[in-house]
Amino acid sequence: MQLGGLTLGRGICIITGASKGFGWALAHEVYHLLEPGSVLLLVARSGTLLQELKEELQSFTDKQRLVVHCIAANLSTTEGVNETVRVAGQEAVNEIDNVLLINNVGSLGPISGFQSFTDLERVNSYLSLNISSPLTLTAGILQTFPRRPGLRWSVVNVSSIYALQALPSWALYCTAKAARKMMFSVLAEEEPNVKVLSYSPGPLDTDMQEEIRRLTGISHCLFPCKESAAKLMKLLLDNDFSSGAHLDFFEV
Ligand SMILES: NC(=O)c1ccc[n+]([C@@H]2O[C@H](COP(=O)([O-])OP(=O)(O)OC[C@H]3O[C@@H](n4cnc5c(N)ncnc54)[C@H](OP(=O)(O)O)[C@@H]3O)[C@@H](O)[C@H]2O)c1
C-alpha cells in the first residue's frame, strides 16, 4: 500500500515496542511503505511475538526484498539499548535515503496517589524505561547514521495527551510523557537536519488500555491501532509539520 503514491523510499526503520499494540500496527504500515532493499528493525522483549510478526510481514510476497530483523531486547537495560544500536549499525553500510526511528515503547506504571511514590528505585525504574531509554537509543542511532545531504532523517516520539494534561494519580505516566515531549523538542532545535515529531495516537484498543480498565475501572471509546498508525504515516509522508511539533490523532 502506498499513501497517495508516496513511499518512505529505501530506508531503515527502527520501531520499538513492535510485538503488539500500536507498534505492531506501525510495523505493518511501515513495511508496505518501504521500497525494496530497505531494512525494518523490530524491537521488544518478546522474541516469539516479533518472529511471528516478521513471518506475517514476509508472507506479503511482493515485499520479500525487505530485510526484517527481530531484536529481542529489554529497553530498560543498557544491554538492550546497546544491542539495538549495534544491530542498526550493521545496516549502516547499505545505501539508504531515509532513517526513521519510532520511539513507541511506553509503559503505564502504577496508577496511584502522589504520596505513594516513596520508593526511589521503583520510580527510577519507570523513568529509566520511559525517558532515559528513548534518549540513549535515539542518541546511539544518531551517532550510527550521521546526517548527510540526500539522507532524510526522522524521529517519532509516541506521546500522549497526558504530555500536556495533568491527571490525578498518573504522576509517573504524565511526567514521562511531558519529559519526552521536551526532550524531543530539544533535539528538533539542535538538529535542523532531523525531522522530529511527537505524536499522540489517541485512545487505542491495546493491552495498555486493558490495564487501564483493570486498574481504574474506566473504559474509553477506543480506536483501532491501524487507523492511528495510518494517520501517523500520512503525517510523515506529507512532511509539512514543523520539526518538534506535538500533534494529536484528533487534530490531524
Ligand atoms: N493504548 C493507548 O490508548 C495509548 C494512548 C496514548 C499513547 N499511547 C502510547 O503508545 C505507545 C504504545 O502503547 P500500546 O498501547 O501499544 O502499549 P502496549 O500494548 O502495552 O505495548 C507496549 C509495547 O512495548 C513493548 N515493551 C514494553 N516494555 C518493554 C521493554 N522493557 N523493552 C522493550 N520493549 C518493551 C511491549 O513488548 P514486550 O512486552 O514484548 O516487551 C509492546 O510491544 C506507548 O508509548 C503509550 O504510552 C497509548
Image: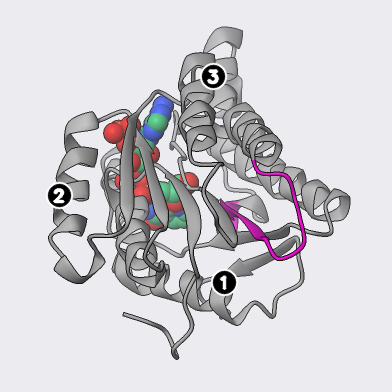
Residue span colored magenta: 145-162
Please provide percent x and percent y for residue 214: 26, 40
Please provide percent x and percent y for residue 144: 64, 36
Query: Does the magenta segment cover residue 93?
Result: no
| Residue 161 is at least partly visible in this image | yes
Image position of 49 (left or right of 219):
left
| x 58%, y 48%: residue | 167
- Please identify the quadrant where the C terminus is shown: bottom right
Which label sits in the foreground, 3 or 1?
1
Q: What residue type is labelled 1?
A: Leu
Label 2 within 8 A of ligand 1 by Cβ: no
Q: Which amino acid does label 3 sit on?
A: Ser
Disc number placed over residue 55 in the picture, else none: 2
How many residues crowd mark 3 within 10 Å: few (<14), some (14–19), many (20+)? Answer: few
* Residue placed furthest toward the bottom: 4
Which label sits in the foreground, 3 or 2?
2
C-alpha span from label 3 to label 1: 40 Å
Please provide percent x and percent y for residue 162: 59, 52
Q: To which residue does mark 3 refer?
A: 116
Disc number placed over residue 236 in the picture, else none: 1
